[in-house]
Amino acid sequence: MTSLATCDRLTVRYPGAARPALADLTLALHAGEKLAVVGESGSGKSTLARALAGLLPVGTALSGAIRWSGPPPRPGRDIGTVFQDPGASLDPLLTVGAHLVEVLRAHLPLGRAEARARAAALLARVHIPDPERALAAWPHQFSGGQAQRIAIALAIAAGPHLLVADEATSALDVLVQAEIVALLRELCRDAGMTLLFITHDIALAGTLADRVAVLHDARLVEIGPAARLLAAPREPYTRALLAAQLDLASPRLVGTRP
Ligand SMILES: Nc1ncnc2c1ncn2[C@@H]1O[C@H](COP(=O)(O)OP(=O)(O)OP(=O)(O)O)[C@@H](O)[C@H]1O
Ligand SMILES: [Mg+2]
């Protein structure tokens, strides 16, 4: 298995923070895999996503290393990012088409007409109905799920080989969440893209990812194939995380049936 990137004892400390947000983390991101990173709030998931995507705030102290298999990736070009709130990636003052054209032309040598055609194709690719019409529409005219599809179109516009999705489905209801997960799976399969999928939902991670990494308190607890990790977690913390989520997902209806 060739690795796309390797974190080697990666430690990240935000400016002024008393403790590192990631401590001594060693893991390989395999080329073409879908790796989910799970853990409770504050465990360092987004920090790992930002570190890999080159989006850590200025002044953040980094030790250890991130090694890339090829030349260092260019954020936005070789790495696409999608976040929880599509509103954060979609500029409310730009039509969807203007935004896509801007991103495409920032990264690729395209003329305006060419970029516009490419933008329509991208919207079709993320299954936005009537792409031509959608190009002329404003972000607020779309539902949350559709807006997230458009945010994904922006993220993949420049043809990245790594897509980092940080809680990209967390704000959506379960049906829409399943649709977005299916879309991510399809895009990765068709483009051979590597996916880093950040989620607090270990069950969801299991449905999408090839491998799952569990973070707790800035440290890597366990990493392994998704099916194995969910069926037979090795670490007590992973077992506790799974048990907590399964309890939430299927509340017992004691006494409601005869
Ligand atoms: N910009 C920042 N400046 C200072 N501390 C930060 C910053 N961003 C995150 N942290 C801290 O770093 C730690 C890890 O945060 P991170 O955002 O990576 O967690 P997370 O696992 O993504 O949590 P969540 O599930 O809530 O998104 C937390 O203690 C957090 O408070
Ligand atoms: Mg986060």
Image: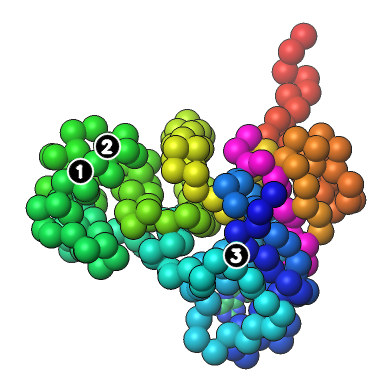
Whether tag 3 and tag 2 are in contact, CB under 8 A, the answer is no
Crowding around mark 1 (Cα neighbors within 10 Å: few <14, some 14 to 19, many 20+) is many
Amino acid carrying label 1: it is Ala
Crowding around mark 3 (Cα neighbors within 10 Å: few <14, some 14 to 19, many 20+) is few
| For residue 202, side relative to residue 59 (left or right) | right
Residue 241 position in % (x across, y down): 78, 48
Q: How far, Cα to Cα, is label 3 from label 1?
A: 32 Å
Q: Give, as a single range, the part of the protein colored magenta.
A: 207-220
| For residue 110, side relative to residue 168 (left or right) | left
User: Would you say residue 219 sits in the magenta stretch?
Assistant: yes
Crowding around mark 2 (Cα neighbors within 10 Å: few <14, some 14 to 19, many 20+) is some
Residue 250 position in % (x across, y down): 70, 30
Residue name at image x 18 percent, y 59 percent:
110
Q: Nearer the viewer, residue 132 or 258?
A: 132
Circle 2 sits on which residue?
124
Whether tag 2 and tag 1 are in contact, CB under 8 A, the answer is yes
Residue 48 position in % (x across, y down): 62, 67
Residue 19 position (above or below residue 178): below
User: Would you say residue 234 sits in the magenta stretch?
Assistant: no
Residue 100 position in % (x across, y down): 23, 56
Circle 1 sits on which residue?
120
Ligand 1 visible in quadrant: bottom right
Circle 3 sits on which residue?
69
Q: Secondary structure at mark 2?
A: helix
Residue name at image x 89 percent, y 47 percent:
234
Residue 138 position (above or below residue 61): above
Quick one: which residue is furthest to the left in this view? 113
Residue 65 position (above or below residue 15): above
Residue name at image x 24 percent, y 32 percent:
129
First in sequence: mark 3 or mark 1? 3
| For residue 131, side relative to residue 125 (left or right) | left
